[in-house]
Amino acid sequence: MQKSESHIRELLVEVSDPEIPVLSIMDMGVVREVSWDGNTANVKITPTYSGCPAMDTIADDIKAKLQGEGYSTKVKLVLSPAWTTDWITERGRKMLKEYGIAPPMEESADKLALSGNAKLVKCTNCGSTNTRMVSQFGSTACKALFQCNDCMEPFDYFKCLK
Amino acid sequence: MKEQLYQYILSLGDNSMILGHRLSELCGHGPSLETDIALTNISLDLFGQVRNYFQYAAELKGEEVSEDQIAFLRYPHEYSNTLLVEQPNKDFAYVIARQFLFDAFHKPFLEGLCASNDDTLAAIAKKSLKESQYHLRFSSEWTKRLGAGTEESHERMQNAINYLWPYLGELFTVGELEQEMASYGIAPDMEAVKASCMQTIAETFAEADIQTPDSKWTQSGGKKGVHTEHLGFILADLQYMQRTYPNMDW
């Protein structure tokens, strides 16, 4: 395969988020810029949350993947513009749901759901919206813990971040 | 100016780091699994912010100093965090009260810092602001839950607020450093930050049945490196690894 920016992008699709292994970092919206100057692949990534412990692993995984294909690689962490859940692709949202994580809703619905004022988050197991928030903070910084009142399934909800 | 900016960044990072460390002490000791996870998540956010601040500070200094040296190898008088954040986790009400007072300040502070003339600080603030909104939601809701809960929880929450209240004012004090940073358009207007913070506190206390303490006394010193006895113990814990195994890395 000819070395090119589009080839790099294809390879990056195969790098997954270490905390949500079904999701590619491309679908996650973590990769902000990819460029190829003929010698070096430059990849800019941005953290979902400031303290996201996955960033170092993601940077290492990117390097390993690209260097494995013969690319000399530089990964740079950028903070601005700040990551938002809007950058998760449609495909990413679908993958999240199939994996058992309710994808983020739009901002106003998210506020209502997280304040406990409306039952809007859909259970990933049975699809019911008769769910309740168990904890505003879940297994990772980006998620809240919910439980379905109908089928009793506990599940993560990916919080909206704008 | 560069040296002052460096000191200013450290003062911002120190608040997040010492509070983050206090919260990390609760890892595995929270009153329930959910609150344990929440408090340690908040700690993680704060440490993420610390890394952003200290990496920037280290970059300003060039080769002289690293992010880890800033975090782990200073003496107590070189830390410029406010006294509020080093106060101990006496019980859950103290943890929530300390967090709520800090979050009520932190959110409008970061909103102000988003408009900083310093692009890197503005970018860190924009990132951190999104997180601090979640923190404030968590701590204000627990303030209400405890304050307007049972007689016992109300009394404990009120006691914690009374105890920590004198430490609130230091968050807004403007010394030479802040004044100079404000003159360059780097630091936010602290009067506006204070007004917004006090409004959040008044609204939350009204819902929480918490009385605003009468005391007008402000405890200060932290910003100048004069700390309560608690900081030394925190640093002993925090620096132990780096001092025992110099330059160790993960």
Image (cartoon, rainbow, N blue to C red):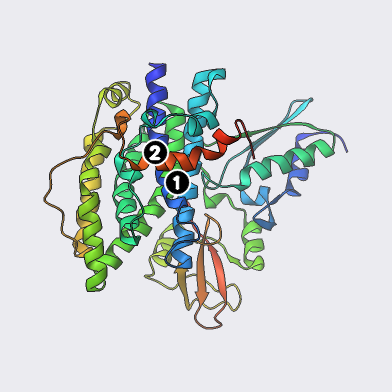
> Dot 1: what SS?
helix
Q: Which residue bears the numbered disc 2?
A: B232
Of the numbered discs 2 and 1, the one sitting upstream in the chain is 1
User: Which is in the foreground here, disc 2 or disc 1?
Assistant: 2
Q: What chain is tagged by disc 1?
A: B
Q: Are marks 2 and 1 on the same chain?
A: yes
* Rendered image: mark on residue B235: none
Where's the N terminus of chain B, which quadrant?
A: top left
Residue at screen point 41% across, 44% down: B129
Residue at screen point 24% across, 44% down: B167
Q: On the picture, is B191 further left or further right than B131?
A: left
Query: In terms of depth relative to the viewer, which is nearer, B48 or B228?
Result: B228
Identity of the residue furthest to the front in this view: B244
How many numbered callouts?
A: 2
Q: On the picture, is A96 further left or further right than A157?
A: right
Residue B14 in view, yes or no = yes
Mark 1: few/some/many CA within 10 Å (<14, 14-19, 20+): many
Q: Which residue bears the numbered disc 1?
A: B21
B32, above or below B102, in the image: below
Identity of the residue furthest to the top in this view: B1
State the image coordinates of residue B130 (x, y, percent, origin top left): 43, 48
Q: On the picture, is B86 further left or further right than B74?
A: left
Residue at screen point 38% across, 65% down: A115
